[in-house]
Image: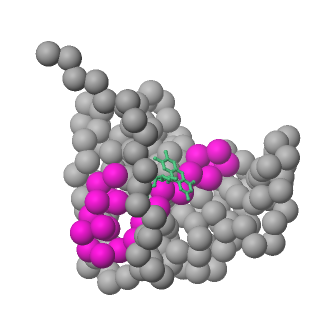
């Protein structure tokens, strides 16, 4: 991905609304293939320790890649002492997805670091990326050029909107 496009996507993230406009978040973009693979291995290691058999299966899988081998992963973290920290991050992530779409770049919310960011092995790698110790990861954006456009039309659930006048 063009450096200018990445900068623009990160820029719009920082313009998202945040509770009390505190902007305590951090956006860590990783474009190093080896580091992304190492991160995936640590996440799998954390899953392997889980009591949940589905998580264990992911942890032991040779092929599982939580970020789908995307060339760019933006980790969105925030000071977890604010109860709205995750909401700030969701606003920033949506800004990123919309910006990516407008630039013709595919994107996907990647959630696995939300469950695993406090695993010691995962945390030490996050710390080496410069993610503050008091931050939790609330989501990531995988970014890249999609091999093919989405073919399935989105089926919307009925009855999710109410208007009262
Ligand atoms: C909070 C949240 C967490 C998500 N986590 C993941 C994830 O970990 N991996 C993934 O492939 N998609 C993830 N998604 C993407 C959803 O699966 C996707 O938005 C949904 O299937 C609708 O598809 P659409 O966004 O293309 O309309 C997540 C979306 C949200 C909002």
| Residue 133 appears in view | no
Q: Is residue 98 located in the magenta-colored stretch of the structure?
A: yes
Which quadrant is home to the C terminus? top left
Which quadrant is home to the N terminus? bottom left
- The number of numbered badges drawn on the structure is 0
Q: Is residue 66 located in the magenta-colored stretch of the structure?
A: no
| Residue 18 appears in view | yes
**For residue 100, above or below residue 140:** below
Magenta-tinted stretch: 94-117
Q: Quadrant of residue 14?
A: bottom left
Q: Quadrant of residue 52?
A: top right
Q: Position of residue 29 (x, y in %)?
A: 44, 67
Colouring convention used in this rendered image of the protein: one colour
Q: Position of residue 38 (x, y in %)?
A: 68, 71
Closer to the camera, 155 or 121? 155
Q: Position of residue 96 (x, y in %)?
A: 33, 59
**For residue 100, above or below residue 87:** below
Identify the residue at image location x=74%, y=56%. Answer: 121
Identify the residue at image location x=80%, y=59%. Answer: 59
Q: Position of residue 82 (x, y in %)?
A: 43, 30
Q: Quadrant of residue 104?
A: bottom left
Farthest residue toward the left?
Answer: 165
Identify the residue at image location x=67%, y=48%. Answer: 116
Closer to the camera, 14 or 111? 111
Q: Is residue 103 left or right of residue 155?
A: left
Q: Is residue 100 left or right of residue 114?
A: left
**For residue 6, above or below residue 158:** below
Farthest residue toward the top?
Answer: 165
Closer to the camera, 160 or 142? 160
């Amino acid at each position: 991905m063009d450096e200018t496009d990445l900068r623009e996507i990160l820029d719009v993230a920082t313009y998202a609304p945040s509770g009390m406009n505190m902007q305590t978040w951090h956006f860590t973009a990783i474009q190093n293939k080896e580091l992304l693979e190492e991160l995936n291995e640590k996440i799998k290691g954390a899953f392997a320790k889980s009591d949940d058999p589905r998580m264990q299966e992911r942890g032991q899988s040779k092929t599982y890649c939580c970020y789908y081998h995307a060339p760019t992963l933006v980790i969105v973290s925030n000071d977890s002492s604010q109860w709205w920290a995750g909401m700030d991050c969701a606003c920033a992530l949506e800004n990123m997805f919309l910006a990516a779409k407008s630039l013709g770049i595919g994107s996907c919310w990647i959630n696995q670091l939300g469950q695993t960011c406090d695993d010691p092995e995962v945390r030490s790698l996050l710390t080496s990326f410069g993610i503050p110790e008091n931050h939790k990861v609330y989501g990531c954006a995988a970014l890249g050029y999609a091999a093919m456009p989405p073919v399935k039309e989105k089926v919307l659930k009925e009855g999710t909107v109410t208007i009262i006048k």
